[in-house]
Amino acid sequence: MAIIGHRFPDLLDLYKSTDGGGEWQAIMEMLAKEAPELSDALWVECNQGKQHLTTVRTGLPEVAWGRLYKGIPNSKSSRAQVTDTTGFCEGRSTVDARLIDELSDGKGPQLRLSEAEGFLQSMSQELSSKIFYGNDIETPDQFMGLAPRFSDKTAPNGSQIIDAGGTNDTNSSIWFVTWGDNQTSLIYPKGTRAGLIREDHGKQRVVDEDGNAYYAYEETFRQHIGLSVRDWRYNARIANIDIDDVKAGTVDLYGLMRKAYYRLQNRRNKDGNIAIYLNRDMLEALDALATNSGSSDNFVRLTRREVEGEEILSYRGIPLRETDALINTEEDVA
């Protein structure tokens, strides 16, 4: 038996969105997830259509001490070019026109807006997840996220990976990310605009699964996005944090945080905007370590600071950004 209304808002959804007197009630997004990455990031327009070409310095030129009547040897720095690609995420909302007619006093647009908010929330969750875990090699429609770029401890950027010791697939990561023109940025296709595009198509003639026609209001949502890491020295990943060990209190999270902090090129935060990303379990564990510690310890605790009017926890002056995009089922990084 087919389930009615599992893909489209129906009269039951309409009833749940109003009180007993038919007045509109705001819907609480029970599945809403935090997406601070999208608001923290610097957005840069691609320089080659849907691709962004950057030149990365991989080695410094040699210098020498001078001596009178002796020449200076030639030298040069080494460079590599990296091309990052973008992808786009889409959604389409379809609301039966008869459902809109059930609403009085012009509340039809409110129903459509309520549906739109659900799509916006879903897209923000998807984009946030791909900032960390996107992989355009395995899934060409996506873009390359942070985790595949920092996934090999023997790679040139392996020094930026701090190993927390987890060996199973119950791991998570804590990320130190520097957003900036010459560090890490989100990218969008040349000639377009950053951010989500919402296009209202109005009332359209559509057909159901049996081929019968009806009218519905349709709108689509689309966002183009990619990621560019121009200088990996400004980022650090604490990988292989076993969630079971964290909950048991056997992981020295503050020791790992200190190691990651000293891997950063810009510890004084003069270049770019640094943020630390971690999920709720990691943040709770850090908070518990700081709260329950004895008076004789002297480690660097979390402090509260105000960022754009919002009070948040920080570590060494760097804001801690809670994100549900980071999972606890990562495979170990070798």
Image (cartoon, rainbow, N blue to C red):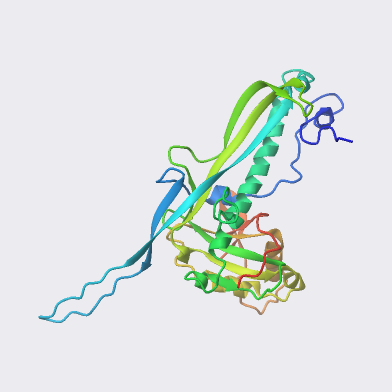
Residue 314: x, y in percent?
A: 59, 61
Task: Count the labels in the image.
Answer: 0
Q: Nearer the viewer, residue 159 or 268?
A: 159
- Which residue lies at the image location 56% right of the left edge and 53% below the top edge? 136
Viewport quadrant of the N terminus: top right
Q: Is residue 262 visible?
A: no
Q: What residue occupies the far front of the structure in this picture?
A: 211
Residue 257 appears at what percent x and percent y? Answer: 59, 70
**Quadrant assignment, res 190:** top left
Residue 76, compared with residue 229, is above or below; it is below
Q: Image check: 1 left or right of 258?
A: right
Q: Residue at x 83, y 24 (%)?
A: 22
Where's residue 149, x and y in %? 53, 62
Residue 162 in the image: state x and y as whole percent.
Answer: 57, 72
Left or right, 32 with respect to 191, comes to: right
Q: Residue at x 77, y 73 (%)?
A: 248
Extreme residue toward the left, this view: 69
Compared across the picture, whether 7 is left or right of 267 comes to right
- The quarter of the displayed image where residue 223 is located: top right
Q: Can residue 26 be spotted in the picture?
A: yes
> Is residue 315 shown above or below 167?
above
Q: Residue at x 79, y 27 (%)?
A: 210
Q: Residue furthest right?
A: 1
State which quarter of the image contains the C terminus.
bottom right
Q: Quadrant of residue 121?
A: top right
